């Protein structure tokens, strides 16, 4: 359980934050008059991490980052990954090599920081940071996560894809706007025999990475660059209340945006606005959960120790996760 210092009111009993919808927790993690910049990662307290370490039993470990070059055709006009290998023999006279990388941090396995996506109506980010302030400051950057020791805790995989194919047959195409329901997550958790607890890091397998791995070059271009449509968790009041009630430290998906994309922003239930803005919950996207799902199935255990070391960039907006699951 999360430490006793964090006792959450119910969604409807949360103190009202002026100008924000009911359910906003701005100020909840503030300390000594200083505005918090880590959001729900504060739930990863030493006792929570120590409890999570008991998940390590066999010592097997799996990295969850997709290879950086995997997304051939990044969406939203983003530049693809590139690598330049440098022969130091020609430059310095001794046989050695360097390399230089170009990475758009939103074009592969990633974390979204708390300054990546604002509330589209108010233009504010987590804890009241305005867009005008965000573009001129390092506030809410990923360096805050690094300075608190990275992201370490208990990971919980919800193998929605495995559950769906076992109970309903062929799963929907991941490059359609199929909405995953929280009732289905509950059913999958029950099927797995998995119970969540506050401070967990939630990972949802939808099948997007599997589709991309198996798709042709033409299919990838059509699915990832020509059309900005992808499977994900339904953006709805039901989803928002479910996520709040579980008090996850962070959430992760293997799909483009964690939530079904594009979101229905006008309806007020865009999950990016709730997770990143209202609660300060990091969102992981396009993580490779395929080998993880296979090991979980073989072990009949869907919880594990999870570590993630994002790039330590001052004011960082996104980062490859550097994530490892340990059993």
Image (cartoon, rainbow, N blue to C red):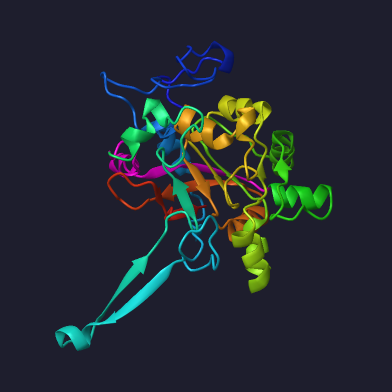
The image shows residue 72, relative to residue 189, as above or below, that is below
For the point 41% across and 35% down, the residue is: 41
Residue 156 drawn in magenta: yes
**Measured from the top left, where is residue 211 in percent x and y?**
67, 62
For the point 55% across and 65% down, the residue is: 73
For the point 52% across and 29% down, the residue is: 198
For the point 70% across and 43% down, the residue is: 192
Task: Name the residue nearer the viewer: 89 or 83.
Answer: 83
Task: Name the residue nearer the viewer: 211 or 122.
Answer: 122
Residue 139 seen from this side? yes
Task: Name the residue nearer the viewer: 224 or 307.
Answer: 224
- Range of magenta residues: 137-159
**Measured from the top left, where is residue 241 in percent x and y?**
62, 25
Q: Quadrant of residue 112?
A: top left
The answer to whether residue 226 is left or right of residue 1 is right
The image shows residue 209, relative to residue 51, as above or below, that is below
Residue 213 drawn in magenta: no
* Count of marks placed on residues: 0
**Measured from the top left, where is residue 69 in percent x and y?**
48, 68
Residue 216 seen from this side? no
Task: Name the residue nearer the viewer: 12 or 324.
Answer: 12
């Amino acid at each position: 359980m999360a430490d006793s210092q964090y006792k959450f009111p119910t969604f409807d009993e949360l103190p009202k934050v002026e100008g924000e919808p009911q359910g906003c927790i701005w100020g909840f993690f503030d300390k000594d008059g200083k505005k918090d910049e880590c959001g729900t990662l504060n739930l990863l307290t030493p006792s929570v991490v120590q409890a999570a370490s008991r998940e390590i039993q066999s010592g097997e470990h799996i990295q969850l980052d997709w290879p950086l070059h995997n997304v051939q055709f990044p969406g939203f006009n983003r530049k693809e990954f590139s690598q330049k290998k440098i022969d130091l023999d020609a430059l310095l006279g001794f046989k050695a090599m360097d390399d230089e990388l170009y990475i758009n941090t939103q074009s592969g396995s990633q974390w979204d920081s708390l300054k990546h996506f604002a509330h589209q109506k108010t233009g504010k980010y987590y804890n009241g940071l305005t867009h005008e302030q965000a573009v001129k400051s390092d506030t809410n950057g990923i360096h805050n996560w690094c300075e608190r020791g990275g992201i370490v805790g208990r990971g919980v995989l919800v193998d929605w894809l495995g559950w769906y194919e076992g109970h309903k047959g062929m799963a929907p195409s991941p490059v359609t706007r199929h909405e995953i329901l929280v009732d289905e997550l509950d059913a999958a958790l029950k099927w797995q025999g998995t119970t969540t607890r506050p401070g967990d890091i939630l990972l949802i397998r939808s099948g997007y990475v599997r589709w991309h791995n198996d798709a042709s070059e033409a299919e990838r271009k059509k699915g990832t660059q020509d059309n900005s449509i992808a499977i994900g968790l339904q953006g709805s009041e039901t989803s928002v209340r479910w996520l709040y009630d579980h008090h996850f430290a962070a959430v992760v998906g293997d799909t483009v945006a964690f939530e079904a994309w594009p979101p229905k922003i006008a309806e007020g239930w865009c999950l990016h606005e709730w997770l990143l803005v209202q609660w300060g919950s990091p969102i992981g996207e396009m993580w490779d959960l395929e080998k993880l799902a296979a090991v979980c199935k073989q072990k009949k255990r869907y919880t594990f120790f999870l570590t993630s070391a994002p790039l330590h960039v001052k004011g960082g907006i996104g980062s490859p996760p550097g994530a490892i699951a340990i059993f």
